[in-house]
Image (cartoon, coloured by chain):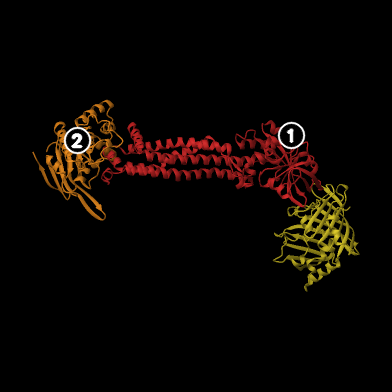
Chain colours: A orange, B yellow, C red
């Protein structure tokens, strides 16, 4: 894997649960290349969400390094980290993804505005993305005026509108019905193939695992199996 | 209020009435008290009538009043101004614990309130309070002889009177000096509670008054204003006259 | 930043019930503070007016030692000349004479302080002539008419038209004695005057007390009671030469201290009221708002919103509510204060004859509205809101997105 955008180098994350040390992630090393459509899977408690958080800079490893596009996240300060999240990472969460007082359009536009992208360019890019995710005509809807699937589409649009290095999707299909889940996966697959957006899921949804081209199985914070499908 | 030893009685019959009720008159076997009781006896009188002149000298004015005074027992005293003309007829009646003043200018009689008690009586160095107090020092003081011998050319006895613990008295002590020969008082000094001299009484000009040799002039000198004084000069004094109780009434105040 | 403001306002609209309740609570606190400040101001001014305008004046001149031991002979010589000088300097002055004695009527009598006043000059200096409960003020053409204090009238059981006998000692040591007719009875002015004040015209005093010239006191008043008291005092002191010059704060230290204390107490009480009312309300509302929306803030942080932007957002929401509350408080507080300035609260049944520091309290408690009494509470409202919201804002700004997002 020559074009790794993400490297985990012997990453360990230890929590204290009461007085007991819990190794949520235990010496995990991993590389993700540009354009991958990969999924972290495993039973709950296997550490997949923690890994995703470590990659997203939402959490810091106890030991080891996380490198995004060659930059060690642990060397970055609070503010640099939030700039990195803003500019290089897209997030899709399982629920409560959107800012409730903003319309679909404004939610998608929000990160661009935080980046300081000029108004006209924002508009162009947001309208394009919303069309791509199939939300044309719903731009002015507020989250509470949209279905769960539509909200996740807005979240996906927001995640990719900044052209991030990687989109981290934490159980993106957990709160939607099957048809919607398939549609969302179609959308993300298509974005991966057409736009070359790198996706890393954290999931135990078989529908996601079925579609992922690489399955990274975790157990007790350790790599159990890294399976690449073609 | 504290007991003042001087009353109108002093003015009326300086010593007669004063010593009549002098503490040292009280029963006691001690020598000091024996002598003082004798002193008291010299001036005993059930009632009195006198004419006198009161001279008041202060930093701001000098005035001379002639007045007539009557007393009966401890409780009743009446003083009436004879001159000057402006104040003629002004009369003060002490009856028990009350003082009434008759004012001819306005033809009114006023009872003095407690607020007025520390005020000057007739512009003199006596306070109204001095007038109203019953002079029952026998209850209030312990007496002892503190000096006996020659002083300024005559033999004197000096008594120091210390208030008894429970006595309601404003003075810290009183020092009385009398002539050894005839027990005639010469000087009486009043000390305040800080034992500083508050005022001094001086007695002089011996004269036969009321059938006895007595000092006819008494001068009171306030210690804080030594250049001021009030002097009472007795002209006549008669003792043990028959005087009616009714004489000491408000109605009689007005009579000229 | 525009976005932050936009989001803030939308949040307020979205949670409109909370917004309305918070705003009204803050507005009510502001209303109470404004009313309270105006009422306190009113009371302070009334007390000062009573202390100064009824009797003391701004500044007084005496012979040194007169105040400790006021006797007839401690006189200011040639008071007319000094008064002329003071008047030329642009201030107003009146000579006063004092004596002590006994006033009696029927079988009742009471110690009194005699005030001999130059009626026309006194009118320029104090307002005591307006403060009559019954009858009329002194008239120079009626030297036999006197005005007496409220409680003195009660003690002697006399009223307008009654006779009163004065007995005292005149300056020549003689008996000062005369009959007067009561022209007027004063309202409550202060302990001393209420209990023992007997006012007569200057000529009557001089005749009675055999005091043909001099004065015991010269009371001075600044014409508009503006400007520095100390400036006026040093001006008078230079005119008065060897005589003692004191301002009213030195003459009535109790009331001056009380007024100063009341000023600081006012601030302290305002802080407490504001803190308790506003801070509790704001803190609670904002804390609730933040915790309710903790996931929202977590998401915002996760997608790259900076902590200061979150703080900004919360402050936008708080300040917008405070602004609305201020408008509410200003409107209602100002209206209520103006109403109470005009009409006052009638405390006649409660505090009739009460006094503080020897100065009577006006039984009609009127508010006094000024820019200060209205704006200070508003300023406080803002300051307290800003302080109260620091904690929830920090909480939201520095929350770890992981905790927020996975917080269930």
Q: Residue A165 carries which label?
A: 2
Circle 1 marks a residue in which chain? C
| Residue picked out by circle 1 | C81
Q: Position of residue C208 (x, y in %)?
A: 80, 43
Where's the N terminus of chain A, which quadrant? top left
Q: Where is residue A22 in the image (x, y as percent from the top left)?
A: 22, 52
Circle 2 marks a residue in which chain? A
* Residue A164 against residue B172 in the figure, above or below: above
Where's the C terminus of chain A, which quadrant? top left
Q: In this view, does B176 lie to the left or right of A81?
A: right
Q: Nearer the viewer, residue B226 or A88?
A: A88
Q: Position of residue B163 (x, y in %)?
A: 73, 65
Q: In which quarter of the image is residue C242?
A: top right
Q: Residues within 10 Å of mark 1 (few under 14, many from 20)?
A: few
Q: Where is residue A41 in the image (x, y as percent from the top left)?
A: 15, 45
Q: Do labels 2 and 1 share a chain?
A: no
Work out whether residue C184 can be spotted.
yes
Q: Quadrant of residue A82?
A: top left
Which secondary structure lies at badge 2?
loop
Q: Is residue B178 left or right of residue C310?
A: right
Q: Nearer the viewer, residue A90 or C195?
A: C195
Q: In this view, does B86 lie to the left or right of C49?
A: right
* Direction left: furthest residue: A230
């Amino acid at each position: 894997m020559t074009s790794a955008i993400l490297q985990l180098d012997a990453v360990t994350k230890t929590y204290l649960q009461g007085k007991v040390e819990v190794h949520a992630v235990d010496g995990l090393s991993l590389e993700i290349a540009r354009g991958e459509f990969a999924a972290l899977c495993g039973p709950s408690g296997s550490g997949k969400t923690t890994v995703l958080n470590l990659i997203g800079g939402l959490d810091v490893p106890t030991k080891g390094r996380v490198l995004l596009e060659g930059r060690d996240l642990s060397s970055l300060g609070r503010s640099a980290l939030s700039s990195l999240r803003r500019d290089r990472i897209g997030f899709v969460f399982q629920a409560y993804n959107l800012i409730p007082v903003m319309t679909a359009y404004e939610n998608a536009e929000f990160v661009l505005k935080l980046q300081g992208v000029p108004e006209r360019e924002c508009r162009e890019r947001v309208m394009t993305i919303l069309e791509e995710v199939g939300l044309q005509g719903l731009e002015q809807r507020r989250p509470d005026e949209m279905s769960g699937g539509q909200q996740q589409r807005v979240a996906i649009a927001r995640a990719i509108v900044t052209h991030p290095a990687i989109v981290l999707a934490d159980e993106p299909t957990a709160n939607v019905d099957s048809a919607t889940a398939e549609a969302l996966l179609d959308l993300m697959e298509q974005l991966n193939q057409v736009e070359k957006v790198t996706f890393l899921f954290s999931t135990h949804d078989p529908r996601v695992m079925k579609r992922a081209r690489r399955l990274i199985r975790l157990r007790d914070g350790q790599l159990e199996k890294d399976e690449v499908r073609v | 209020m504290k007991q003042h030893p001087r009353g109108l009685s002093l003015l009326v019959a300086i010593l007669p009435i004063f010593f009549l009720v002098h503490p040292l008159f009280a029963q006691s076997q001690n020598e000091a008290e024996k002598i003082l009781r004798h002193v008291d006896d010299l001036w005993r009188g059930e009632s009195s009538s006198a004419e006198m002149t009161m001279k008041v000298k202060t930093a701001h004015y000098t005035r001379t009043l002639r007045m007539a005074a009557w007393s009966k027992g401890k409780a009743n005293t009446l003083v009436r101004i004879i001159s000057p003309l402006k104040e003629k007829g002004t009369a003060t009646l002490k009856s028990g614990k009350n003082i009434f003043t008759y004012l001819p200018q306005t033809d009114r009689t006023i009872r003095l309130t407690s607020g007025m008690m520390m005020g000057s009586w007739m512009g003199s160095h006596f306070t109204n309070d001095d007038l109203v107090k019953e002079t029952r020092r026998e209850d209030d003081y312990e007496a002892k002889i503190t000096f006996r011998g020659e002083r300024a050319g005559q033999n004197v006895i000096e008594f120091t009177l210390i208030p008894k613990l429970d006595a309601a008295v404003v003075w810290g002590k009183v020092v009385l000096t009398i002539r050894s020969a005839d027990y005639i008082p010469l000087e009486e000094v009043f000390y305040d509670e800080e034992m500083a001299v508050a005022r001094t009484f001086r007695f002089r000009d011996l004269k036969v008054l009321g059938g006895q040799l007595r000092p006819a002039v008494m001068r009171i000198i306030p210690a804080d204003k030594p250049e001021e004084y009030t002097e009472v000069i007795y002209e006549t004094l008669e003792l043990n006259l028959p005087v009616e109780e009714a004489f000491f009434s408000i109605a009689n105040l007005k009579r000229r | 930043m525009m976005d932050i403001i936009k989001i803030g306002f939308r949040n307020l609209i979205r949670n409109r019930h909370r917004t309305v309740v918070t705003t009204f609570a803050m507005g009510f606190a502001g209303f109470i503070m404004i009313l309270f400040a105006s009422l306190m101001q009113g009371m302070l001014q009334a007390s000062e007016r009573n202390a100064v305008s009824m009797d003391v004046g701004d500044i007084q001149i005496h012979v040194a030692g007169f105040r400790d031991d006021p006797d007839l002979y401690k006189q200011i010589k040639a008071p007319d000349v000094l008064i002329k000088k003071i008047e030329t300097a642009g201030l107003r002055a009146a000579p006063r004479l004092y004596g002590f004695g006994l006033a009696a009527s029927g079988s009742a009598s009471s110690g009194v302080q005699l005030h001999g006043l130059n009626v026309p000059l006194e009118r320029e200096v104090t307002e005591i002539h307006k403060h009559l409960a019954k009858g009329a003020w002194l008239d120079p053409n009626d030297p036999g008419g006197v005005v007496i204090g409220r409680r003195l009238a009660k003690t002697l059981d006399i009223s307008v038209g009654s006779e009163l006998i004065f007995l005292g000692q005149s300056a020549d040591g003689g008996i000062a004695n005369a009959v007067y007719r009561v022209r007027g009875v004063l309202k409550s002015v202060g302990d001393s005057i209420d209990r023992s004040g007997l006012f007569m015209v200057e000529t009557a005093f001089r005749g009675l007390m055999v005091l043909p010239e001099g004065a015991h006191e010269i009371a001075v008043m600044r014409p508009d009671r503006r400007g520095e008291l100390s400036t006026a005092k040093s001006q008078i002191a230079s005119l008065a030469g060897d005589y003692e010059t004191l301002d009213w704060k030195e003459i009535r230290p109790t009331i001056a201290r009380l007024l100063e204390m009341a000023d600081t107490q006012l601030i302290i009480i305002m802080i407490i009221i504001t803190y308790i009312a506003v801070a509790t309300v704001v803190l609670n509302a904002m804390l609730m708002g933040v915790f309710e929306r903790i996931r929202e803030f977590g998401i915002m942080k996760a997608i790259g919103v900076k902590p200061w932007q979150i703080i900004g957002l919360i402050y936008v929401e708080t300040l917008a509510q405070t602004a609305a509350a201020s408008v509410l408080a200003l409107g209602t507080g100002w209206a209520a204060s103006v109403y109470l300035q005009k009409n006052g609260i009638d405390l006649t049944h409660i505090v009739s004859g009460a006094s503080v520091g020897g100065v009577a309290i006006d039984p009609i408690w009127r508010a006094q509205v000024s820019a200060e009494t209205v704006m200070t509470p508003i300023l406080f409202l803002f300051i307290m809101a800003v302080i109260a919201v620091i904690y929830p804002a920090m909480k939201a700004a520095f929350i770890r997105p992981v905790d927020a997002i996975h917080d269930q």
